Amino acid sequence: MAPAPVHPDPLGRLQGLCLWGRALAFDLGTSRAVSSLSAALLDALYRIVRLTGNREKALRVAMLAHRLSLRVQLSAAPTALQDRIEQRLRASLATGAFSHLARPPADSDFSGELERRAMVLKVPRLAGDGRVTERGVFLITFTHLFGELAHQVDVAQLTREYTLVLEPSWSGYAIPEILQFAETAVTPVFVMATEPRDFAFLERFDPQLVPLPFGASNWVDPEVFRPTPGWHRVFDAGYIGFWGAVKRHHALFRAMRRLGDPTYRVALIGGPWEGTRHEVAALARLYGVLPQLTFFEKLTPEEVSEVIGQCKVSLLLSRKEGSNRGLFESMFAGTPALLIRENLGVRKDYLTEETGRIVPERELASALRWFRDHGGDFEPRPWAMANISPTATTAALNEALRKHAAARGEDWTVDCVRKANRPEVTYLNGDDRRRLPSVAAILSQYARLA
């Protein structure tokens, strides 16, 4: 595949300065100090809004304060502020407020998204009279679709016959899209949570929401992302991520400038979901590292695997993520990972002696230099295959659901089928797609009555 051309704005330096200012503002806004202050101010605002009688707006303020406070929470134990907010949220469960807040706007257009991003992993077992004797399993990915699912189907009826499994796309679980299921589901809903702070929040919030210690990082297709025999590590580092400010490309450019080595080469693999590669190029030019970058855009998963497989290390520099896929796609392609310690969302114990390293951001430049010489010392794919492959993760999912079924006195005689993210959810065995009900059939069968 050919690199994507970049054409920084003719104003060049002015655009770069504007983007640099935006990056610094973003970093300041997501710092621990500002997050702590913002959460405290929002907690005070909650009290004011509550006095006005606008209960739903007050809940939104409280949930935002909780999500901001995650950056201040240094362990899985809740802070005093979080404990106070969670008491308020639990007190609101019986009101139906979360279900109302999770409802998508009237002008939303999710046509086709549910069909691409949800699937049946197991069908219910029925008795002769049509009674369900063993529930099936229905999985849905991407947080913004959880509200759409609840808008389209009768969640109570669906969860009588299916166990619902959620795969959120972003850390910070004090949101109505997730909490609504504590109100509407008649059986426990399982929620993937690779961030320990999210996992602990669900554990203490309500028994109807059961956390699972894995997420999107655990469903990479190893047949798509795999080492390419005979390819050389022509790039010193690679970064998979869209072009927006969240991915913090400026942190990479700052570290490259500190290295002061014009021969250091980086592959940037992205897409236009947010921001543009031209903006990233303008920012790189301001730092003086643009000639060292090669941009790739809109690649197929197979092409992403080829490019990242030619890199000595794969990077993730965001301060907040969902479970993240790019870092772990790299592992399956044979490339070790480098994650900044300040990240919220990625399960850090996946970075092992075999798979990569975690460093404070202040040490990023020295870590890049180290991986240039030692990236070939790692063999991440065997660890990834054994621990976070779709086969290993499906086994973990089956075990969790089986134990929970046994605790409830329910049958479990058939396991879930295997799925992968390529990047959308897909069955690893093509026969399963033909054998299991489609999402369209589920939406029709459990449709909400007008």
Image: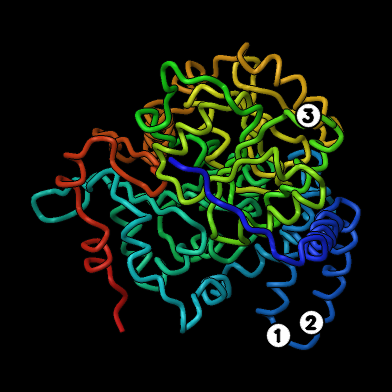
Find the distance from the CA under tag 3 to the CA under tag 2: 41 Å
Residue 359's label in the rendered image is 3
Check disc 1: other Cα within 10 Å, few if <14, some if 14-19, many if 20+: few
Residue 204's label in the rendered image is none
Percent from the top left, x then y, of residue 50? 77, 80
The type of residue carrying mark 2 is Val
The quarter in which the C terminus is drawn is bottom left
Q: Nearer the viewer, mark 1 or mark 3?
A: 3
Viewer-closest of 131 and 234: 234
The residue that appears at 41% across and 17% down in the rendered structure is 229
Residue at disc 1, secondary structure: loop
The type of residue carrying mark 3 is Val
Viewer-closest of 397 and 18: 18
The type of residue carrying mark 1 is Asn
Query: What residue is disc 1 on?
Result: 54
Query: What residue is disc 2 on?
Result: 49
Q: Is residue 259 left or right of residue 89?
A: right
Q: Is residue 192 in view?
A: yes
Percent from the top left, x then y, of residue 210? 52, 46
Q: Are marks 1 and 2 in contact (CB under 8 Å)?
A: yes
